[in-house]
Amino acid sequence: MRSIDDLDTPAILIDAGRAEANIARAQAHADRHGLKLRPHIKTHKLPYWAKKQIAAGAVGITCQKIGEAEVMADAGLTDIFLPYNILGRAKLERLKALHGRVTLSVTTDSMDTLMGLAATFTDPGHRLPVLVECDTGMGRCGVQSAGEAVALASEIDKVRGLVFGGLMTYPGAGRAAETEAWLADAQQALAAAGLSCERISSGGTPDMWRSGEHSVVTEYRPGTYIYLDRYQVAKGVGSLDDCALTVLSTVVSHPTPIRAILDAGSKALSSDTLGLADFGELLGISGARVTSLSEEHGNVTLSGGAELRIGERVRVVPDHCCVVTNLFDEVHLIEGDKVIETLPVKARGRMG
Amino acid sequence: MRSIDDLDTPAILIDAGRAEANIARAQAHADRHGLKLRPHIKTHKLPYWAKKQIAAGAVGITCQKIGEAEVMADAGLTDIFLPYNILGRAKLERLKALHGRVTLSVTTDSMDTLMGLAATFTDPGHRLPVLVECDTGMGRCGVQSAGEAVALASEIDKVRGLVFGGLMTYPGAGRAAETEAWLADAQQALAAAGLSCERISSGGTPDMWRSGEHSVVTEYRPGTYIYLDRYQVAKGVGSLDDCALTVLSTVVSHPTPIRAILDAGSKALSSDTLGLADFGELLGISGARVTSLSEEHGNVTLSGGAELRIGERVRVVPDHCCVVTNLFDEVHLIEGDKVIETLPVKARGRMG
């Protein structure tokens, strides 16, 4: 069996045991609180983990791109939520084909999107569930008020090939209470309009852990929880030792006593800090932070007596694991120092 | 022939005429100043453009990864500079194989890197040129003083399979004068030590345009100049109309009068702003800026009467084109609205 030492750098390592523990911990939390878990595959983009998530008890998966959903359907995943406004003839045709082979649901936040769906899905015997996306404060997509949600839900229900499927939001981090109130208000307004709303889907790994029994949310779409990263650690979701994804890298230069250079730059770690200071830290080497990146170099600043030597291989815990996965064509599953499997990141690069 | 309208979004468009004009303009500047041009392929990662750059008069190409160099060698490029500290048996073996089939040169900034090269390249009949990388103020890799450069150059020249190939630096933007002084000083120190230094290689698109006849620099390695981007425009290298790379994107949501959402997020545009405000702007729509990104959504803030409608397709000029290329598996070459060719980004994902 290959060892980590046999891999060339930079490379993504996934500690399989940690990832499985993270899956189990989230599923147990969801089960305890009567929440359905519908993991977002954007983080790993791998059928391998999607199947493990389903096996652990998830009701289905979430994809952000039709191309991702197609890869997952090809791999045998059968229940897919695509919380995205799908527009344009090409994408709608692909969506229709997907609807023919998996249990599919989508979202809309506008009449424009709804009209495209309505023109494509016309079979009352096989209706597509369409959820209304709600902007509960994050400021991205979504209807702006409960009234707008009711109006759009009513329009969905008028279309013979569609059925109103509930409410969907992505609250963004730290907006759990605000989101809860928004959704409860919308649910009441829907009920008053005679519209039943049995599914309320929310997302975001950090807030999942704050969700309780009394939430109106019925389904959660966490993504990052499977791997974790520095951002999640900063949010208190776990420790560095719970992070399953690291980037194996080599020290290629050490120009000054406090500066060492890695062969992982912004094309391996991404420039996405999610607001954190630094671009990553080195597993097991406190006082070693990736303080700046150029495309193929990562500058490490050493402090507190931390030492590195040229040629040494280190493991970087990145700030945001989802965008790191998106940069590599393959990941290596490991147990300790053993490489147990190398997997192509099948759903990477599926832009549309 | 296909039109841009036939492409699904998000997608990279390369205006072929603009890219060719950018190549010609840089080559003319280099020729005028007696500079050798050795374009960095990190920006496009395409044999197609590398060959055009050579045809225009470049002396060779620059790659940052062995994997990139292998792709370029496979495509018929014959003179490749790899300004990187190559370490480890696997990479050194690949480097040796490359040396067997193209005119190759590399760099080092340490005895550690040099020892690996020395153990691998042992044939005095086919010596590998090794340049000394110099940190002229950017604070990345490189020896820290002219004295260190002389010491390392002397060590290179002692190795039978290697030959001292000159000096290399990446100055970073705006450090042209400082870099010039550093390199001139090192060149003199080398001469005093009896070491001839015929090749001095520098890089960075913005500073290339400030290089003059009296520079000690003999060779320039610009990358971004072929496509340009918002950062280069901000540095005065060209106008938005000179930018050859744009990301075709669809407006998928328009939740408020001043907020529209694109289907291009940080997984299409990257979070790399190079210090600019905003993540991109929309070609031909002044007052439309990409003000925030999540993974698959780009938030556009509209001002000054700018308008967008859901379903509309727009072209985003990104802040940093090199990292955008790195996110897509293919690019579309266009002339006006016609797609003249779709090219796989062959050297993308070659991490090692």
Image: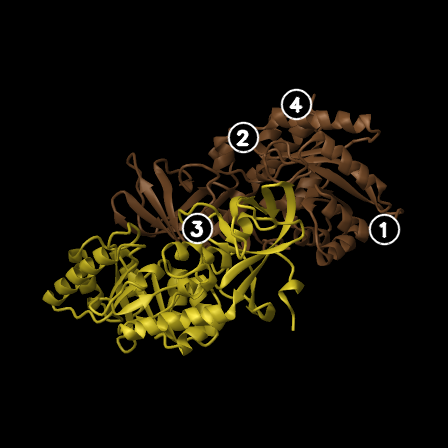
Chain colours: A brown, B yellow
Quadrant of the image occupied by residue A129: top right
The residue that appears at 49% across and 48% down in the rendered structure is: B279
Task: Provide the residue designation for mark 2.
Answer: A237
x then y, percent, for residue B321: 46, 57
- In what quadrant of the picture does the N terminus of chain B appear? bottom right
* Side of B308 where B56 appears, left or right: left
**On the picture, is B197 further left or further right than B282?**
left
Marks 3/1: CA–CA distance:
46 Å
- Which amino acid type is marked by label 4? Gly
Q: Is label 3 on the same chain as label 1? A: yes
The residue that label 3 is drawn on is A266
| Residue type highlighted by circle 2 | Val
Q: Are marks 1 and 2 on the same chain?
A: yes
Q: Are marks 2 and 4 in contact (CB under 8 Å)?
A: no
Viewer-side label of 2, 4: 4
Numbered circle sitting on residue B188: none
